[in-house]
Image (cartoon, rainbow, N blue to C red):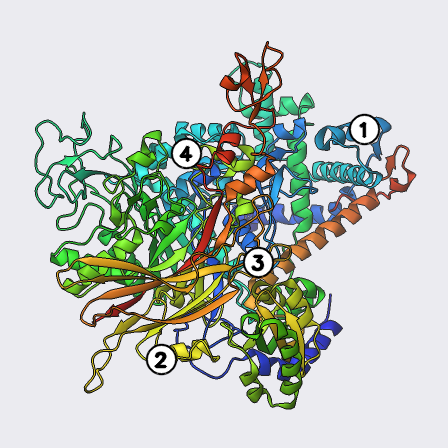
Amino acid sequence: MRSPSIQTYVLWTLLFAMAPTGSAQTVPPDLTPPFERTEARKRCASYEPTKQPFFGETHLHTAYSFDAVVLDTRNTPADAYWYAKGGRVGLPPWADTRTAEQSQLPPPPSMRTDVTEHPYCMPGEHCQFMATRTIQFPEGRALDFAAITDHSEQFGESNICTFEATETCASDQDCDPAVTGQTCASDNLCRPKGYNSPLCGIARDEISRLRQGAAASIFAGLENVSQNPMRPAFCGPNGALCDRQAKLVWDKIRNDAEAAYDRTSSCTFTSFIAYEYTAMAANGRCADAEALPCWDQSQDNAIPDVPDAGWSPSADCPSGAACIANFTGDSGADNLHRNVIFRNNDVIDRPISNVESPLGCGFGADCTSTPGSPVASPAVMLQSLKDACIKNPAKPRCDVLTIPHNPNMSRGSMFILPENTPAGLAEARLRNQLEPLVELTQIKGQSECRYNAKTGMAWTNPPDELCDFENEGWARLGGAADGYLTDAMQTTESIPPRSYVRNTLANGIAYAAVKGVNPFKLGFVGGLDNHNGTPGQSDAQQYAKSGAHGIQSFATSAEALNERFFLGLETNAGGLTVAWAEENSRDAIFTALKNRETYATSGTRPIVRVFGGFNLPADICKVGDFAARGYARGVPMGGTLKRGRRPPGRGQQAPSFAVSALMDPGWSGHPGTPLQRAQIVKGWVDAAGQTHEQVYDVAGRADDQAKVDLRTCRPTGGGLKMLCTLWTDPDFDPARHAFYYVRVLENPSCRWNQFYCNARGVDCGKPMGTCRSQAPTANARGCNSDADCGGGVCTLPDSYEEFEYTQCCSGIVPQTVQQRAWTSPIWYTP
Amino acid sequence: MTRHRLGPWLRHPVLHFVLIGVTLFVARELWSPAALPRPPVQREPILISAEQIGVMKEDFVRRWGIPATPAQMSALIAQNIEEEMLYREARLLALDFQDGSVHRRLVEKMRALGDRPGRPPEELVSEARALGLDDDVVIRRLLVEKMRILLAQDPAAPALTDADLWDYLDRHRERFLQPAELTFSQLFLDEDLRGASIEEAARATLAQARTLPLADAAALSDPFLLGLRFQAYSRPRLIARFGTAFAEQVFALEPGVWSGPIASAYGLHLVLVEETREPHLPEVAAIRQQLLEAVGTERATQRLAQGLVRLRERYRIRVEGREDLSTPGVAVAAQP
């Protein structure tokens, strides 16, 4: 037996000896932080009163999401955190490295697992399954924080269907069924009850054949719908079996977040306990000009745009119009998803998913929408969340916020103005309190604004050509081909302008001007929505290799360049969230999110700061202390300016905005792209309640000729390393509500498909194929179609996959994009 | 008369029980030490034949596509020996006795043989054992793992103390070491403002800064968005903001003196390192849970390794063609 060892004494002595120097440095200046500390933890050594930028992820899926695990994603939340911190993880496909004999054996028994692990190892290690591809951040690009947001509707179902048994048993009692919900299966292994249900069988069969298919859709069709969502039969009466499994998964998610959280004074990484609330409302639309979503009860429209035979007025439509099928034929899966992020480890006992609190018409035989609320109102869900967390006396430290994502795929359902009723006002207040942010960009497109250069169709007034950036042609989630809109079909009717955040911000202040509360006071974050378990992987070059969707990812699929593939050409590498906070702790970052002191980037890492105020110093860019002076004389991004006190004898001054930005420094061997310009987007409401908007260039030059070398994808010079400017609104009306946000554009850089085309060796300088022809003159001649071959056929080289040459070389697909950052707005309230 | 009075007592059952008890006790006391000696367990030597080694080699090639290196071969053989020992010890300890999984496996095998239906499972199991069906890959694997778990456990082990956690932390410093941190001030020189003479300006500024107190030197800097002072920055954070080359140079600087210029993507920086904090161990309270788990795992691993060493002593091991892997053994009683 060891007595208290020599080492222990030495260690203690050393620690005492070091204590004076250590503490002098680690304890931040003696001040009360402006954010509330709700957890017991070490203070951060790196504490900056004027705040520092922290890069993070607010939207990511792992193997705990059913639609990810069926794509053979095996990274769990623990793996995802490991990746976020700079570790290396695997990606499918997985090589089965078992011997023939071993593959017949059950897995080696070990400790009990309640939640499936999907074990794999890295190349060089010996284990059951080996990663054939691996991925890791370059040095310096690891994240500061991450929220892992798996689909909460299928926590339990996913664990039941894809459980990897590790424990042997002789009887059910061996499996501790009261805790685990597992029974002893016929192969003497403990598995959750329901594992052998037909639906789970289908799901596993699909995984084994590496394709995505019916099972995920069946679950979504039961659980994510707007009318009477329910759990599948194998979940038992009232879904109790799946509820129990969901609880186990939720507990695991909480533990994994705790394990990843750095509670030491180094504060290297912050994790957040989170989940995704995944409502897919199947709405029709009102036949009047408002085109509001409505509950299309009979769902039997034979002809699009024409009411059903014997139609009756819809309660959802203001003018009593009929509810007609949506433009894509039938009513579809409008995206009404939200990411739910908790402040600390005092969280609700289980997620409130669409099954518990549906978003849509809800429960009931008739399933009309909630009286007084629009059909897609989140009021009931937000109230449940508030009651279970913020207002729950049993959870005194609980705090939560929700982040809607992909309004671009909501067909206008995400941001319907609450009605002028007490219930409507209650909804407005709930949204104002619990939804301070919107995910402005992610893999499935950006949601700031929309413009289509090919048709000239604009969703903003006046048109803003820079909105033609990572727009999705898919108007809704779900991926069925009829959801795809060709350029000609993309209209302000098929994609209502309120699907876009700039318009929504304007609607919000117009509502606030009348009702006094702004339901859409939305700051900006960016996310991935990646289903690989790799948070923050927003680099375009890497995306061209790894994609975002497990086995369907690009390196393994020729579908990458298929524009009619839901997860193909129109996707992008996804965005990032940057939070300005004093330190890297949960309380500090959550406070930044709640106060909207955040900005979204389209994936690159410029640093942007904005202050607005009536008395910002004119020389704020010329002398130092930008942040200290900004805070002293104005409000940061996400803040609200109130009408200033009028100096005697003078009219109200116009507000100024100080904008400062640094380009993405890149990483070793990969220089970042310089900045092109900064813009301020202003929106306001006139006396008649009409909304307006205008975009101002405030720094840099639009005609900068800086380009990128398409072969190497390196910048060819030009642009700004940093910029700083003070801009005063030339057209300010102190009586009117307004908002101002900043858009910082980088110089053009390669879009991910250009990296893909380069990597595939597609040479647009040569003809696409080679003639195979009887005529000796035509044979072996270069060609772009059969017509070039004089009766022969034009064949592609073996190295080209379908679509590759045409998509890489036609010029229809953009080869470059201007990556950008969007800062949370600053609002002006009279 | 006396007979009369003793009669009921002699017939009283309590007396009978007492007598029987005494008799049994005496018998047990007299008999047990000598009459039930524990017979020494006969452990057959473990032989890994050249043929088995050949199979391992082939298997490896099938699995990994390349032949095994000598080191890999040795490891494979050692693993085989270990599993064989564990399996045999598990059998000696009768770990398969009343094991539900073994039981069910045997029943399944008998049923697969197409035996008469309806026979009681117990009968099937004993017949399976008689037929030698219990030497089976599944059962073997089960027993090996059971034995491993048994060796790794020690129910009598005392609870972990803070000293244990400190000790572990001390021995695994590199795993828990927090990164070195620097607190530094900078003076920034903006290329756009300084133009071609920026290098010259940097040298002049450096000379001037060295003559000034820290607070006054700040006035020499061009504005920089992130400010002029950076508190407790680790190398990764510095790389994230300014790039690898910049971070390496700053971490190599002598503290307390203005140095540079050092280039970043943004321009030139003069840097004064104010404080350095060497890599340091975190507070135990902040990592208690990780430490508890780590020490628990370490103890279990040690017990397993010690158990395996004890087992190896009991077996004579012969690996054909590999004298280095062969050992003599000694016979001891069947205790793990």
Within the image, what quadrant is residue A233 found in?
Answer: top left
> Which residue is drawn at the image coordinates 60% and 67% (left, top)?
B238
Circle 3 crowding by C-alpha within 10 Å: few under 14, some 14–19, many from 20:
many
Q: Are marks 3 and 2 on the same chain?
A: yes
Amino acid type for the residue under numbered disc 1: Gln
The amino acid pointed to by label 4 is: Gly
Q: CA distance from mark 3 to mark 2?
A: 33 Å
Residue drawn at (20%, 64%), measured in percent from left and top? Answer: A517
Element assignment for label 2: helix
Closest to the observer, A467 or A259: A467
Label 1 CA crowd tier, 10 Å (few <14, some 14–19, many 20+): some
Which one is earlier in the sequence, the residue at label 3 or at label 2?
Answer: 2
Where, quadrant-wise, is the C terminus of chain A in this rendering?
bottom left
- Identify the chain of the residue marked 4, using the numbered disc in the image: A
The three-letter code of the residue at mark 2 reads Arg
Residue A65 visible? The answer is yes
- At label 3, the amino acid type is Gly
Closest to the camera, between mark 4 and mark 2, is 2
The residues tagged by marks 4 and 2 sit, at their Cα atoms, a distance apart of 62 Å
**In this picture, residue A609 sits left or right of residue B256:** left
Q: Look at the numbered disc 4 and give the secondary structure of its residue.
A: loop
Q: Are marks 1 and 3 in contact (CB under 8 Å)?
A: no
Q: Are marks 1 and 2 on the same chain?
A: no
Q: CA distance from mark 1 to mark 2?
A: 81 Å
Same chain shared by disc 1 and disc 3: no
The numbered mark 1 sits on a residue in which chain? B
Which element type, helix, strand or loop, lies under badge 1? helix
Task: Check disc 3 and report the residue beneath it.
Answer: A666
Residue tagged by mark 1? B52
Closer-to-camera residue (A539/A262):
A539
